Amino acid sequence: MINYTPIQKGLKQEAKTEDINNLLLVRSVNQCINDAKSRPIPKMLFSEFWHEEELCILFADTNLGKSILAVQIANSISNGEAIRGFKLEAKKQVVMYFDFEMSDKQFEKRYSINYANHYIFDNNFLRIEINPDCTNFNDFEKALFEAIENNIVLYDAKILIIDNLTYLKTQATETAKEALPLMKRLKELKIKHNLSILALAHTPKRNLINPITKNDLAGSKHLSNFADSIFAIGESCKDKSLRYLKQVKARATEVIYDSENIITCEISQPYNFLAFEFTDFSNEREHLKQPSENEQADLDSSILSLKASQPHLTDREIARQLNTNPVKVGRVLKRNKV
């Protein structure tokens, strides 16, 4: 129960908690802090990338291993054992993995040796998929969210992994119209049931010359505004077998794994579990595609042309239009004394 302290003379001594129809909760800042002190400090679920009580987004281009890493994280939390090279502070607990990507047979293949000698998951790991025989609904999106919430309550789950966000909407999440209500519904679920949610998302085709930014996330503005944390999987152009993990947004901690300190991994299946294997820390620049002389000349020309035609544009706005980064734009303009 939350007690409300008056913030100035003349206000009511307290707001009655039974007045549940009041949309806004008003407390003094000191009361907010006191209320927060009574709750535990959120623990790491996957190093600094994802903490308890966060709505976190993991994004990457197709076929870079989002689902592989997500299952690995779910396996770690459900059996209470940290992934080598990463941190897990939370206790062993139920994880609900909503798999809207793979069939059970495809899933089986990844966690076996040619459909034999299967990996044994902890029973805390629950995999949920769409029941193809269920047609008793008029509004799919509404029915889906109701089913998700019902299962959260039924299994007393606090950890949700959604693979992937696109399936939760009948249309793609690239537009604000679709992304905004989707994130609001997930945020409401998170707050109502005190959840930790990891949602997987795709990126539009990106230019591998440029570092990963939150602008690479489909529906980036509205998805990122509602997310507590965001991280991404990048493809190394130096070694096609390598992937790298980069923090894009964090609220519970500083951004530690930025462009100067990415984590590199290899995807391997030494026995019956397909997984990301930690290899090292690195600089993102070492893994980006190097532009050819012609590509660089074309980009320089486009930057100068856009600035000449629209001089009010900032470096960031130019970078967004040309799918490059603001630092590169600034260097080109400075070099050409614009």
Image (cartoon, grey):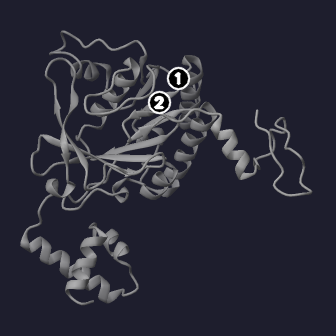
Farthest left residue? 293
Q: Position of residue 5 (x, y in %)?
A: 81, 47
- Determine the image quadrant of residue 327: bottom left
Q: Quadrant of the N terminus?
A: top right
In the image, which disc is placed on residue 303? Answer: none
> How many marks can you see?
2
The span from disc 2 to disc 1 (Cα, nearest Å) is 8 Å
Q: Position of residue 137 (x, y in %)?
A: 58, 29
Q: Which residue is disc 1 drawn over?
A: 157
User: Is 161 on the left or on the right of 211, as rendered?
Assistant: right
Q: Which residue is disc 2 drawn over?
A: 160
Q: Residues within 10 Å of mark 1 (few under 14, many from 20)?
A: many
Q: Position of residue 38 (x, y in %)?
A: 65, 34
Report if the CB atoms under discs 2 and 1 are less than 8 Å apart: yes
User: Is 293 on the left or on the right of 6, as rendered?
Assistant: left
Q: Position of residue 47 (x, y in %)?
A: 36, 37
Residue at image position (46%, 53%) is 224
Residue type, numbered disc 2: Leu
Farthest right residue? 10
